[in-house]
Image (cartoon, helix red, strand yellow):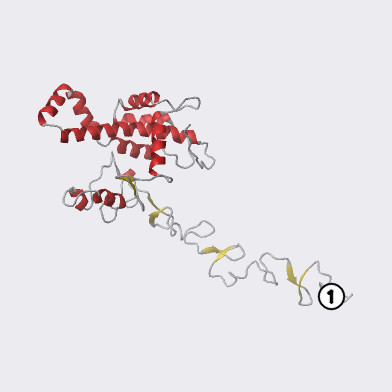
Amino acid sequence: MNCEKTDDLGTGLNGMDVVQENLRSACVWKLHKSHQQLIQLIHTQPRDKIKQLKKKKKNRFIETLRQNESIWWDYENLWNKNCWQMGNQVSTFTASCSYQQMNQLNSTLSSWVQQCVTQSGGSSYQGGVNTILESETRLRETLGIYALPSIIVNSILVHGNIDCEEIDPQGCTVLSAICAGFVEGSDPQQCHYTPAPTVNYNCTSSNKDCRGICYGTWRKDKCGQCLPSDDESFDDCVGCDGVAFSGKKINPCGFCLQNNSSNFATYGRDCNDTCNGQHAIDSCGQCLSQSDPSWDSCVGCDGV
């Protein structure tokens, strides 16, 4: 059994939704990896053997090279853009949306992935063991991966930030770990190039964040600042009334007031200096609760 814990914030998603998408993504990765192995074969086999391979499987060979070089990355970009639940909408986190993104990349990809899902054991509640998910689970246990996402380079878990703003060895932990695996002098030019080339599938102005980064995560807040949404300064100009630059803040007693008002710190305190307290100054100048027997004790029967 494969399970995934999800905090869906009341949107209706469950762990099975996540597991099923993980399996579809793994199948796309399987195709992507087979392409990489083919590229490796080209570089390691004698030329005459490669020529025979091209001649024997010409159409499939060329088609694989042309379409599958970055297919997993392209799929994930499209899925994150179009299927990942945004604004508490569950309707796009579906197999249908997933397969639509695949068909944008390759007309036969969705049928290939469906076959991959079925042949590996399926992903229904009543299904048995899925060999791909079982293999991934065992690999995760073997490598000691307890947090997701995680990246393994040469069997070593990469620690630190895996989200690179600039793709260069100095600022990108992942690329630095990859480059460190090469014998000195044998590393590729990307390990010395800034920025390293990246592939952005069908990236238009609408796909860029406020910094101009394709599929970036920075957003312009209500204050006009371009920041990550988890930045402490995000929307910091918005007052407690929800209005940008209103200057209103929550005072110590929980009231929304102009932060430069003279009574900002004391508003809401009673004469006993208690927030939202029940004490008041009686006619005798005493700070008491109105239920106190001494309330207005100095007042005579004539009311004076």
Q: Residue at x 50, y 25 (%)?
A: 126
Quarter of the image holding residue 299?
bottom right
Residue 98 coordinates in the image, percent (x, y): 39, 32
Q: Which residue is mark 1?
A: 297
Quarter of the image holding residue 271?
bottom right
Name of the residue lying farthest toward the front:
142
Residue 139 coordinates in the image, percent (x, y): 38, 38
Q: Name above or below for residue 280 compared with residue 89.
A: below
Q: Residue at x 53, y 63 (%)?
A: 248
Disc 1, SS: loop
155 or 303: which is nearer to us?
155
225 or 40: which is nearer to us?
40
Residue 68 coordinates in the image, percent (x, y): 25, 32
Q: Residue at x 24, y 35 (%)?
A: 36
- Residue type (three-letter) at the residue carrying disc 1: Ser
Q: How many marks?
A: 1
In the displayed structure image, the side of residue 268 where residue 301 appears, left or right? right
